[in-house]
Amino acid sequence: MVDLELYRVFCTVAKCGSLSKAARELFVSQPAVSQSIKQLENQLGVPLFMRTCKGIELSESGKLIIADVEHAMELLDGAENILRRQR
């Protein structure tokens, strides 16, 4: 089972188009973001990003899953918000 935080990092990198921008948004170091992406790619067995001279962009595998992962993250955030409101 893959750590959900790795998927959150994946979504942030995809949105930002840069490891360093994602790191700033997540309040972590750039190497931590890079390590999280490598860990997720290793666990899934596919590259999720292609490194380019302009930054980083989704690979074909990344493009296949980004919409579903973003939707799953939204659902989890919504569920957490429901529980917070109940407290």
Image (cartoon, helix red, strand yellow):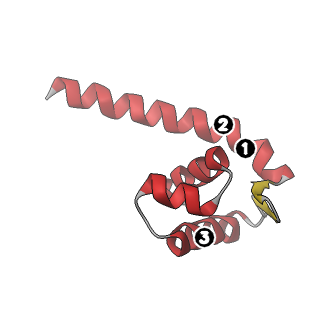
Q: Quadrant of the C terminus?
A: top left
Q: Which residue is mark 2?
A: 68
The reply, left or right, for residue 54 in relation to residue 27 is right
- Which secondary structure, mark 1? helix
Camera sees residue 9 = yes
How packed mark 2 is, by other alpha carbons closer than 10 Å (few <14, some 14-19, many 20 or more), is few
Which residue is depicted at the point 41% across and 35% down?
77
Q: Which residue is mark 1?
A: 65
Horizontal side of 57 relative to 9 (left or right) equals: right
The answer to whether residue 67 is above or below residue 18 is: above
Residue wearing tag 3: 34
- Could you tell me if the residues under marks 2 and 1 are in contact, i.e. CB atoms within 8 Å? yes
Q: Residues within 10 Å of mark 3 (few under 14, many from 20)?
A: some
Q: Of the residues shown, which amino acid type is indicated by label 2?
A: Asp
- Identity of the residue drawn at 79% across and 59% down: 54
Name the front one of labels 1 and 3.
Answer: 3
Which amino acid lies under the numbered mark 3 shown in the image of this protein?
A: Ser
The picture places residue 35, in percent across and down from the top left corner, at: 57, 73
Classify mark 1: residues with Cα within 10 Å, few (<14), some (14-19) or many (20+). few
Task: Please say whether residue 3 is visible from this viewpoint.
Answer: no
Disc 1 and disc 3: Cα gap in Å? 19 Å
